[in-house]
Image (spheres, rainbow, N blue to C red):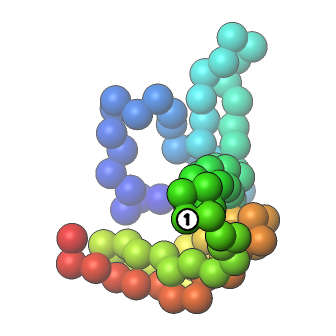
Amino acid sequence: MNEIIIDPDWGFKLVEENNNIFFEIETPSGAARFPQELVLSVFMKTMKLRAESNRGIQIKEISLSTNFKLTQSQKALFEKAAAKNSLRIMYFVVTDA
């Protein structure tokens, strides 16, 4: 987590607990924490639904592009989030962006 550059304008905090990273947001009932996998899964679900609606086909396989190399644990996290949405990550691609 020390490699993550925290932006104070984000509407959340990143919190590490028992070697797990959580997204923490303030709610009317106090702070709420969400695991990375859940946040990624919700994002992937939204993108999958948009793509399927736009293209008119069911999407089962994707490629994931980043502008940095992912660690094995990061790849596993993305794969778990994808699986929750019946997606399979075929390729991890690093771009020069």
Q: How many marks?
A: 1
Residue 88: percent from left, percent from top: 68, 81
Residue 84 placement (x, y as % from top left): 78, 65
Residue 66 spot, x, y in % from top left: 38, 72
Specify few, some or many for label 1: CA neighbours under 10 Å numbering under 14, 14-19, or 20 or more: few
Is residue 36 in view from this perspective?
no
* Residue 48 on image: x %, y %: 62, 60
Location of residue 73 by image quarter: bottom right
2 relative to 71 in the view: left or right: left
Q: Is residue 39 left or right of residue 84?
A: left
In the rendered image of this protein, does residue 93 appear above or below residue 78?
A: below
Vertical position of residue 36 compared to residue 57: above or below? above
Residue at the (59%, 42%) spot, across then down? 23
Q: Give the quadrant of residue 7.
A: top left
In this rendering, position of residue 95 left or right of residue 76: left
At a point 21% along the width and 71% down the height, the residue shown is 97
Q: For the view shown, which residue lies furthest in the left direction?
A: 96
Tell me which corner region of the image, top left, top right, bottom left or bottom right, holds residue 36: bottom right
